[in-house]
């Protein structure tokens, strides 16, 4: 898919992984898509280091590139060095279910 022109987003459909299709309500999926699209600035269907750094910066967080790489590596199941929507859904499910091991925090050493 070609990169969207400046100021325009690609039309991306974020699909819930098949193994999680019954894990979320339609409202949760809608919220996840909206949240994911806030991170996925270029509309390519993934969150990369630069996109995560941008969002964290907008939130007033100063986080080094190494820490951001570590945050992505923690949830990157396919080794792409990015977070796709399926991986994002897995994180959201684990957080919702109280699995604190996958919670991304900026205060970890």
Image (cartoon, grey):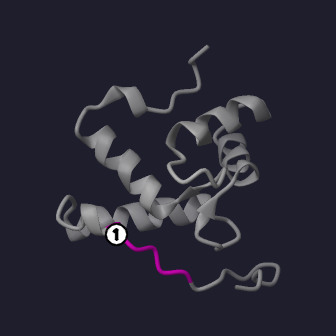
- Camera-side residue: 58 or 6? 6
Q: Residue at x 65, y 83 (%)?
A: 10
Q: Is residue 75 magenta?
A: no
Q: Residue at x 45, y 74 (%)?
A: 14
* Label 1 residue SS: helix
Residue 3 falls in which quadrant of the image? Answer: bottom right
Measuring from the top left, give residue 31's x and y in whole percent.
Answer: 36, 63
Q: Residue at x 33, y 39 (%)?
A: 95
Residue 91 falls in which quadrant of the image? Answer: top left
Q: Is residue 14 magenta?
A: yes
Q: Residues within 10 Å of mark 1 (few under 14, many from 20)?
A: few
Task: Give left or right: position of 92 versus 108.
Answer: left
Picture mark count: 1
Measuring from the top left, give residue 51's x and y in whole percent.
Answer: 70, 54
Which quadrant: the C terminus?
A: top right
Residue 87 falls in which quadrant of the image? Answer: bottom left
Task: Give left or right: position of 9 versus 84.
Answer: right
Residue furthest top in the image: 109
Q: Residue at x 50, y 43 (%)?
A: 75
Classify 20 as above or below 71: below
Measuring from the top left, give residue 60's x and y in whole percent.
Answer: 68, 35
Which quadrant: the N terminus?
A: bottom right
Q: Which residues are magenta?
A: 12-17
Q: Which residue is mark 1?
A: 30
Measuring from the top left, give residue 79's x and y in whole percent.
Answer: 60, 50
């Amino acid at each position: 898919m070609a990169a969207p022109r400046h100021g325009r987003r690609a039309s991306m459909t974020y699909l819930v992984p098949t193994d999680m299709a019954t894990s979320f309500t339609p409202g949760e999926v809608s919220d996840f898509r909206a949240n994911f699209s806030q991170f996925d600035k270029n509309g390519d269907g993934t969150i990369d280091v630069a996109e995560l750094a941008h969002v964290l910066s907008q939130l007033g967080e100063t986080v080094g590139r190494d820490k951001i790489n570590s945050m992505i590596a923690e949830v990157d199941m396919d080794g792409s060095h990015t977070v796709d929507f399926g991986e994002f859904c897995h994180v959201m499910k684990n957080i919702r279910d109280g699995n604190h091991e996958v919670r991304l925090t900026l205060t970890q050493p």
